[in-house]
Amino acid sequence: MSGRADAFEDWIRTSFVQMNTELENLYFAKDNREQVIGCGDPIKSTLRDEGQAYVVALLAEGNTGEGFDSAFGVLGSVGLYMGALRRHELTNPAREERSPFREASSLALHVGASLGMAPRFSTGHLATHNRARAGIRKSFTSLADEFLFIDENTRGILSLQRAADALTTVVHLGVSSPVADVMFDAAKQALRDVMRFNDRLINQLDVDRFFYSVRPYYKPYRVGRQEYRGANAGDFSGINELDLLLGLCRANDPYYAQLLVDKMLFMLPSDQARLRECMTRTSLLDELLMLVAEHGHADWFQQNARAYLEVCDLFGRSAAQHHDGLVRRFIEAPAAHLNEQGLEGITASGPPLPVLLRSLEVLRDMRLAADRRDIATRHEDLARLRGVVRGYAPLAVGPTALS
Ligand code: HEM
């Protein structure tokens, strides 16, 4: 990394975190915690001006050809800086036609375009590619709830990636292989871990601190003229690889295909490539259904179809837990107390909350293969497979803290 990029990142890891934390504590102590404008102005000006100096120096340096890690690091630094400017209402896409931060926009656009990613910080910067220094991860604040959120999100993402890796290996082995059992087991264990980490968030994350002091950094903001949606823990390919390989969502379903297109640039280039490859494969469900008539009674079919169904059960439950536990508890419930103005920009992707909740419900129900007529789920196909597997009973998962 160049000296200037290093200096910017050092600032992001130290003074930037201190200033954001001070501001959060000021807002949080007020009767009206959403009242950000007019609160802590001297700190906000220092944050804006110090960050601007690093940005201007980097912009003057141009593309130094230091490689992917360096460019990705700069995109993260400038993205965290712009995310904080948005959070502190120093910019707001609703009142502006272009970002008032021209140099930061130029830097983000330059680096984002050269990487093939959206010109803003994304989940990779705070999760899978958030490099710890002496144990400390990059963050906006030093609040315990932010670290809890970032860490459990990352653990969840890593586990979903493990499950996706395991199912990709089943594709290579072939769904009739007796060896597939170890990979189905690995996928099941990884999904149980996802639920364990979700449970920890449900039980330990403070609703108000998350809602008022962490979530606002994930609002959409403008880079140049265009507004870019916020990052969310779903911006990695593993979750969609699971959808597609299990066959619960299909890449030719217009709703789902649109979702994939929209999230492509928020993922690392390596994840974009994985997702594209995955979109060309036949799902395990379709493969099993093609084999049912001729081989449904064979031992290998019984064994692998059962393991496949168990993976689906666990995946569906983890999706239900995300929606009915995390989204309800940490977004929907506290948002019920807000007025119309407070609701603006509350979601990371931008649409009004009821619209976002409906679209998340659609995803949950696709992953649960729910019996819904208004969307394309695999309810009937899964029921057919369940009917063929002798004595199939859904897996017992142990207690999860669903609300
Ligand atoms: C406090 C914890 C969490 C809350 C409140 C939460 C809430 C949300 C919300 C509201 C969205 C929609 C994006 C938007 O705001 O516009 C979303 C998307 C998503 N989140 Fe979470 N989330 C949490 C943790 C997690 C964790 C731990 C994971 C697992 C790794 C996860 C996986 C996803 C995925 C995959 C998406 C994209 C939509 C989908 O494919 O389902 N989230 N989340």
Image: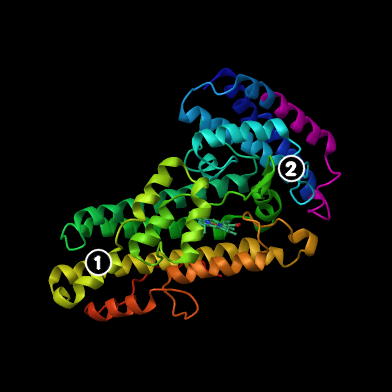
Which range of residues does the magenta coloring cover?
A: 29-54
Magenta-drawn stretch contains 49: yes
**Circle number at residue 179:** none
Few, some or many C-alpha atoms within 10 Å of disc 1 (few <14, some 14-19, many ≥20)? some
Frontmost of labels 2 and 1 is 2
Q: Residue furthest right?
A: 38
Give percent across and percent down for residue 48.
75, 32
Few, some or many C-alpha atoms within 10 Å of disc 2 (few <14, some 14-19, many ≥20)? some
Please determine whether, in this image, residue 263 is positioned above or below residue 243: above
Q: Mark 1 — residue? A: 287
Q: Is residue 51 visible?
A: yes
- What amino acid is found at the position of numbered circle 2 in the picture? Arg
Q: Mark 2 — residue? A: 98
* Residue at point 46%, 60% (across, down): 257
Please determine whether, in this image, residue 110 is positioned above or below residue 286: above
- What amino acid is found at the position of numbered circle 1 in the picture? Glu
Relative to 180, 263 lies left or right = right
